[in-house]
Amino acid sequence: MPLDEEALAQKYQVMKHRIISSTQIATRTTTIVSRLTQPATDGEKPAIVCLTAEARVASKLISVVEIAKRDLVSKGVKCFQYNALSSRVGEVPRERKEKGGGSEANQPGDDDGADGEGDGDFQTMPDPMGVTKKRNTPVMTIYLSSVAVRELRVAYGEQRQA
């Protein structure tokens, strides 16, 4: 059963963060801990922190979550974790294959002679496939909450820290 994020946002206060390679672990963990340790007032919805990262920085995401969970447990706050894996289609640059025998004598940019003959005689065609290609990139999303969330438990399973 796919997760309905709009229904989740109606019942809970969802705070989304993206983890990238330049994200500082300490600042992100303090943000998470401060958000999940705030006492909920009467009219306020319970908080859920949603952290998302692509595969190449998933290790940083896991570090942020584990440090935040350790801080929450030391403060006596229950923590519920829900892990989701998905993919995102994105464009990546195409690697150009070098043509030729690999000799270094006729590399582009070399001057073969003073008369300018050689490289300017032929025009190269553009690549028919384009300069980018589409690839699926794995994405990891971790939800942290101080209360149990039934919708997330049904969709992804649950881990508890107490």
Image: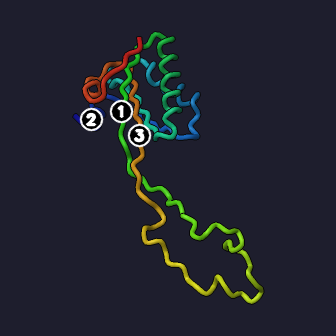
Distance Cα–Cα, label 1 vs label 3: 8 Å
Distance Cα–Cα, label 2 vs label 3: 15 Å
Between 108 and 39, the one nearer to me in the picture: 108
Element carrying mark 3: strand
Give the number of the disc on residue 3: 2
Give the number of the disc on residue 84: 1
Q: How crowded is mark 2: few (under 14 residues within 10 Å), some or many (20 or more)?
A: few
Say which quarter of the image contains residue 13. Answer: top left
Task: Give, as a three-letter code, the residue at label 3.
Answer: Val
Is residue 70 depicted above or below 101 in this figure? Answer: above
Element carrying mark 2: loop
Say which quarter of the image contains residue 49. Answer: top left
Is residue 73 depicted above or below 34 in this figure? Answer: above
Q: Considering only order in the chain, which callout, 3 or 1, is on the residue closer to the N terminus?
A: 1
Direction from residue 89 to residue 95 in the image, left or right: right
CB within 8 Å, label 1 to label 2? yes
Direction from residue 19 to residue 160 in the image, left or right: left
Specify whether residue 88 is in view.
Answer: yes
Task: Give, as a three-letter code, the residue at label 1.
Answer: Ala
Give the number of the disc on residue 43: none
Q: Considering only order in the chain, which callout, 2 or 1, is on the residue closer to the N terminus?
A: 2
- For the C terminus, the image quarter is top left
Give the number of the disc on residue 139: 3
Of circles 1 and 2, the one toward us is 1
Specify whether residue 41 is in view.
Answer: no
Between 96 and 158, the one nearer to me in the picture: 96
CB within 8 Å, label 2 to label 3? no
- For the N terminus, the image quarter is top left
Which residue corresponds to the image point at 72% horizontal and 75% vertical from the top-left? 110
Task: Give, as a three-letter code, the residue at label 2.
Answer: Leu
> How far across and how far down the image is residue 104, in percent?
70, 68
